[in-house]
Amino acid sequence: MNTLPEYLYTPAQVQELDRRAIQDHGLPGLSLMERAGRRGWEVLLKHWPHVRRLRVLCGGGNNGGDGYVVARLARRAGLGVRLQALSDPDRLNGDAATVARRFQEEGGQIESWDPTGLADEDVVVDALLGTGLDRPVEGRYREALQALKAAGVPVLAIDVPSGLNAGTGAVMGEAVEAHCTVTFIGLKPGLLTGAGPQCAGTLYFDDLGVPPEIYQDMAPVAGLCRDELLRRCLGPRPAHAHKGQFGHALVIGGDLGMGGAARMAGEAAGRTGAGLVSVATRPAHVAALLAARPELMVHGLDSAEGLAPLLEKATAWALGPGLGQGPWGRALWEAALRTEHPCVLDADALNLLAADPRPCPNALLTPHPGEAARLLGVTPAEVQADRLAAADALVERYRGAVVLKGAGSVIAAPGALPRLVTAGNPGMASGGMGDVLTGVVLGLLAQGLSAVEAAELGALVHARAADRAARAGERGLLAGDVLMALRAEVNP
Ligand SMILES: NC(=O)C1=CN([C@@H]2O[C@H](COP(=O)(O)OP(=O)(O)OC[C@H]3O[C@@H](n4cnc5c(N)ncnc54)[C@H](O)[C@@H]3O)[C@@H](O)[C@H]2O)[C@@H](O)CC1
Ligand SMILES: [K+]
C-alpha cells in the first residue's frame, strides 16, 4: 500500500473519481469511508505500534468521517481515544453522520475542540480537512492547527495534511506538519511539491479498491519521475564502446573567483557518463582545474573569442555555473546563444535571460525558485505557491525544457506531461548542488538523450545520488559528496 502510483490528479479530479466509483460503479460511499478509516488505522499502528493515547480531530466533512472510523477502530483495540469535533457533529451529512453514529453506538464520546493535554497524546489524527478545503483556514480550525504545531506531537494526516492545498502545495494560512499521511484514490501533486513534502511527511497511498476504469478518460495533471527511465536510457554499454559514442560536453562558466562551479559541473558531466568533457573558463582557473581533475580539458578564455571552435566540437554545452553577469559572462552568453546545439542554462545564464527574454527551444533551464521568479517577473513566493503552474509558464514563455528546483522538483517541457521528483533531501540546500545538477543533465544531453528525458532523468539521478550521499547525515552534505555518489546511480 505504500508504493505510490505514477499519475497525479487535482483534488477536484479526485472528487470526480470518488463520484464515478460511487455513482457509476455502485460502490457505496460508506464502504469507501470505512476502508479509508481502516487504512488510516493500519498506517497509525505501523508507525506507532505502542500507541496508547490517541486524539482524533474531526472536521465537518467526509475527511472528518474518516476520522470517526479511525477513532472507532482505535477504541476497539483498547486505546484511550479522545475525539474532538471542530464543526457541530449534529450537522454532519450522509456517510460522515453514519460513521459518527457508529462511533457513538460503541460508546465513543464526541467532545468539542479543547487543546488541553494535546502535548501528552502519543499521536494525533488529523481528520479536519481533506480535498474539500476551499478557503484559507481561520477561526477554530486555525487555532487547532497552531496548537498542534506548538504541541510538537506526532500527527497522522488523513488524505491531506489539513490546511495544505493538495492541488498546488501551498499552505492556506496554516497547515499541519504530519509525520505521515495516508492519501486515497488519487495522488495529489500538492502533497509532493512546495510545502507538501514538509506537511505530508512519509506518504502512503491506497486506492480504496476502486475499479481501474474510473481513471479512464481522466488526464492526469502530472506524473512522478520514472525509475524505469534509468534502465531504459542508461543500460549497459556495448563491449566495443569508445569515448566518441558518449558525446562531448562543454561547460562554460567560472568568472574570477567562481572556478569551482565550472569544475563541479564538468566533473558531474563526466560522472554521468559523457565521453569527453571540456571546460571554458577564466585563464586564472585553468591550472587549478587541471590539477584537481586532469580528465577535464580546460580552456582559458579572456573573452568570447575562442569560444566558437569549442562550441562547434561540443555535442551539448552548459552555460551558467559561476558565469557572473559582468562583461565576461555577458560576452560568452551572447556568443553561446548563437548556436543551436542542445544546451543547459543555469544560474547567471538564467539571470541574463531574464533581463533579455527570448525563446530558447534548444535549451534546458534549471532555475531555483528565485531564478524562476525573475524569469517570470513574479515573486519567489508566487512561484512556490503553485510550482506546477510556474514550470508550465516557463515552458510557455521560453519554449524549452525546465527543471524547477526545490523540494519536489518539477520537470516540464513542451508537449510533455510534467513530472515530479520525490527523491532528494534538505541536505541539498548547500552551495554547488545546482552546478552538479547542471553537469548531470549536460552529461545526459551529450549522450544523446532528448531535453525532456535529460531533464527527468537528470533531476532523478541527482536527487537519488544526494539521498545516497546523505545516508551519513543531511547536515553538512556537500555537492562534492553528491558527485561521488553519481556513479552508483547512473549504473542501474
Ligand atoms: N465518498 C467520498 O467522497 C470519500 C471521501 N473521503 C474523504 O473525504 C474527503 C473529502 O470530503 P469532503 O468533500 O466532505 O471535504 P472535506 O472533508 O475535506 O472538507 C469539507 C468541509 O470542510 C469545510 N471547509 C473547507 N475549507 C475550510 C476551511 N478553510 N476551514 C474550515 N472549514 C473548511 C467545507 O465547508 C466542508 O464542510 C477526502 O479528503 C477524504 O478524506 C474518503 O472517505 C473516501 C471516500
Ligand atoms: K486531513
Image (tube, rainbow, N blue to C red):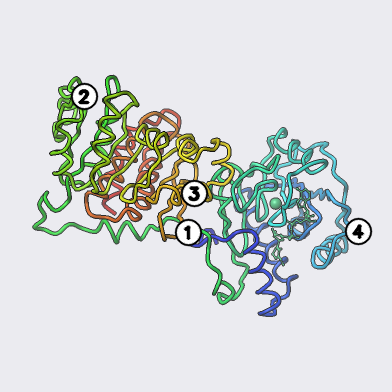
| Other-residue count near label 1 (Cα within 10 Å), few / some / many at <14 / 14–19 / ≥20 | many
First along the sequence among labels 1 and 4: 4
Disc 3 to disc 4: CB gap under 8 Å: no
Residue located beneath label 2 in the image: 282
**Residue 302 is drawn in which quadrant?**
top left
168 displayed left or right of 419: right
18 displayed left or right of 3: right
**Cα–Cα span, label 1 and label 3:** 18 Å
**Cα–Cα span, label 3 and label 4:** 45 Å
Residue located beneath label 4 in the image: 90
- Quarter of the image that includes the N terminus: bottom right
Where does residue 134 sit, x and y in percent of width and height?
73, 52
First along the sequence among labels 1 and 3: 1
- Closest to the camera, between mark 2 and mark 4, is 2
| Above-or-below relation of 462 to 17 | above
- At mark 1, the secondary structure is strand
Where does residue 248 sit, x and y in percent of width and height?
17, 45
Kind of residue indicated by mark 2:
Arg
Residue located beneath label 3 in the image: 393
- At mark 4, the secondary structure is helix
- At mark 3, the secondary structure is helix
- What numbered label is drawn on residue 223? 1
Q: Residue at x 40, y 54 (%)?
A: 413
- Quarter of the image that includes the C terminus: bottom left
- Closest to the camera, between mark 1 and mark 4, is 1
- Closest to the camera, between mark 2 and mark 3, is 3
Where does residue 70 sit, x and y in percent of width and height?
73, 57
